[in-house]
Image (cartoon, helix red, strand yellow):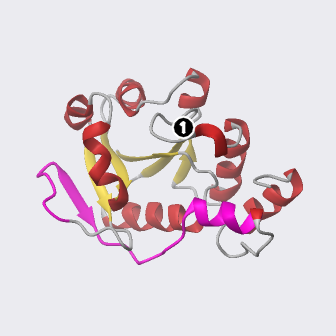
Amino acid sequence: MKIGILGGTFNPIHLGHLIMAEEVRQKICLDRVVFVPANLPPHKDNGEIIDACCRLKMLRLAIRGNSYFSVSDVEIKRGGRSYTIDTVKGFTKIYPDDQLYFIIGSDLVKYLNEWKDVKDIIALVRFVVATRPGYPLENLPSYMTTIDIRAVDISAFEIRQCIKENRSFRYLVPETVRQYIIKKGLYK
């Protein structure tokens, strides 16, 4: 099987994440895409990140109905800082005979050299880089495959700002996620 791994903070999950996952899945014929929410991202200010259990719940709500998508809570269960190398090593044990594809947006390419044990990650998975508006792809290493996806300019930061400023964020996230955010009073 061909399994895509899409890690991230998902603070919150939004339609841009889902469109990217679906288009990459179709274009490289993945059998499954596994969303992996970080417990504590190592390169972000954790002050604005809501509880991992809430982010996990929103992911489950967002992918409901798509049989190609699943969610793994491996980083949340592990606790502490979430490092891709630990997750990838775990996935190679769960899926020893499968081909693993690690999906990232083009906005993350410039940070790869800062990742813990990035050379080991490269040896274990195939990197798939999805295009993202405002982040051109230039001088990519040969181990990366690029996938052009439709331009969807949505960011979790933008959504959080909308909520703080009491502006509409309808149609930026799945409706089930929007209702969950409102019900729980998240990002206020």
Q: Nearer the viewer, residue 182 or 5?
A: 182
Horizontal arrangement in the rendering, residue 137 relative to residue 184 (left or right):
left
Q: Does the magenta segment cover residue 39?
A: no
> Badge 1 local density, few (<14 within 10 Å), some, or many (20+)?
many
Q: Quadrant of residue 115?
A: top left
Q: Quadrant of residue 96?
A: top left
How many badges with numbers are in the image? Answer: 1
Q: Position of residue 35 (x, y in %)?
A: 52, 46
Q: Nearer the viewer, residue 104 or 188?
A: 188
Classify the position of the C terminus by image quarter.
bottom right
Q: Position of residue 141 (x, y in %)?
A: 13, 51
Q: Is residue 75 above or below residue 48?
A: above
| Residue range highlighted in magenta | 138-163
Residue sitting at x 36%, y 59%: 107
Q: Position of residue 65 (x, y in %)?
A: 65, 60
Horizontal arrangement in the rendering, residue 147 relative to residue 45 (left or right):
left
Q: Is residue 126 above or below residue 132?
A: above
Q: Position of residue 164 (x, y in %)?
A: 76, 62
**Given the current orientation, which residue lies at the most extreme right position?**
183
Residue sitting at x 54%, y 64%: 155
Q: Does the magenta segment cover residue 146?
A: yes
Q: Residue flagged by tag 1: what amino acid is it?
A: Ala
Q: Nearer the viewer, residue 57 or 46?
A: 46
SS for dot 1: loop
Q: Which residue is mark 1?
A: 38
Classify the position of the N terminus by image quarter.
top left
